[in-house]
Image (tube, grey):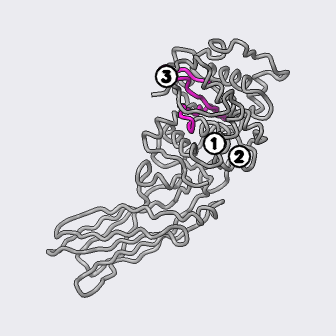
Amino acid sequence: MGKPNFLFKTMLGVLLFTSLGCGFFSLSNSQMVNEQTDPVLPQELPTDIQPTEAQPPESQSEIEISYVYTDGLVTSLYHLYGTVLDNFVDVTLTNHGNANGTVIVETYIEGYTTKALDTVVVGAGESIEIHQNPRLMAEAVDKLNSEKPGTFHIKITQIDSDKELTLIEDSQQVLLYSRRDFVWIDGFETAEEYELWAAWVTPTDPKVEALIRAAADYTSSGTMWSGYGGHENDDNGGVWERLEAIWKAEEDYRLTYISTMVAYGPNTVQRMRLPAEVIEQASGNCVELAILFASAAEALGLETAIIRIPGHAYVAVRMDQVNANYYFIETTLIGRASFNDAINLGLEEWNDTIPHLEAQEEGYAWVTIQDARQKGILPIPWN
């Protein structure tokens, strides 16, 4: 779904809008690409984030306990724990006794999450697993603008008819990443990692919705509509009109491209702002501007993709629901060139990208946002 056929080089600028010339700028396209290139992600991929098995102290109960927790909490992707990502903590309870046991499992990160709580009955001779992901508190997320240490607490209690027995009460140190950190996850393939960019595409964010409202003023009807309406290859120009309207609205927001450096820390990470923050700060790096544009396009029911090339990223928007033809948009030109020019440069970049994607070369990736949604990679629920 959504990925173009690399054997068919889509000449969108020639096919539908023959007025798009590549000689508009006094600055050559090759010079422009060099000017806008920024470090999307470093080439080294390792991190220390990995499941860590704890060694609980021995207890007087016949219920054996083991648990595995994640020693680094990726704040930006925390809403994906337990689905796309592993659970934050997995607890295994094994009852070696002859009677059933009722057990309460509590986990939380002090000052950052609510308590996760499960009450279970472990049958005689039975072994069960409990998976918990304590919910991050909104006020805690707002404070996580840099990496911070945290303390993970776990308490497991057995309840008899007339008493409670604490089986374990343990604490472990963990690292909480900044809410803006894009972190390489241990065990993920490179293509899977880039697919996590879809979490930053936030079509329902109020600031993205406000951008779309502003864009409506630039359409002939004064409205913004959803989907493709059964048209193929944008034969009525409806997709183009809405995308150009978004571009003009972004110009009104005085957005501009600014290259930003990677975040420094114990692991290899990339500092990435959400679309709302790009709008608030009127600036973004290449991937941030591409993600903002993709957010607005997805909100309009259009299929979008982020294309990653070494040191850079740009956006693609599908023209219909039948053919794998796209508009390729160089979003770093916002504030200094027209939408036509952004399409021209995007198409030129795409034609350069095709052979590298076909060869599956390092540093190249195509991320279809709708495919990522089907895999459970949902938008970050906070800004």
Q: In this view, does 317 lie above or below 124?
A: above
Q: Does the stretch in magenta take in 315?
A: yes
User: What residue lies at 52% left-to-right and 59% top-to-bottom?
Assistant: 73
Decide which of tag 2 and tag 3 comes sooner along the chain: 3
Q: Which amino acid does label 2 sit on?
A: Ile
Give the structural element (helix, strand or loop) at label 3.
loop
Residue 216, quarter of picture: top right
The residue carrying mark 1 is 42
Q: Nearer the viewer, residue 349 or 282?
A: 282
Q: How far apart are marks 2 and 1 (CA)?
A: 25 Å
Give the structural element (helix, strand or loop) at label 1.
loop
Q: Which of marks 2 and 1 is in front?
A: 2
Decide which of tag 3 and tag 1 comes sooner along the chain: 1
* Residue 370, percent from left and from top: 49, 36
* Residue 132, percent from left and from top: 39, 62
Give the structural element (helix, strand or loop) at label 2.
helix
**Crowd around label 3: few <14 · some 14–19 · many ≥20 (10 Å):** few
Q: Which of marks 3 and 1 is in front?
A: 3
Q: Quadrant of the C terminus?
A: bottom right
The residue carrying mark 2 is 279
| For residue 23, side relative to residue 293 (left or right) | right
Q: In which quarter of the image is the N terminus?
A: top left
The answer to whether mark 3 and mark 1 are in CB contact below 8 A is no
The residue carrying mark 3 is 230
| For residue 317, side relative to residue 62 (left or right) | right
User: What residue lies at 47% left-to-right and 21% top-to-bottom?
Assistant: 322
Q: Does the stretch in magenta take in 360?
A: no
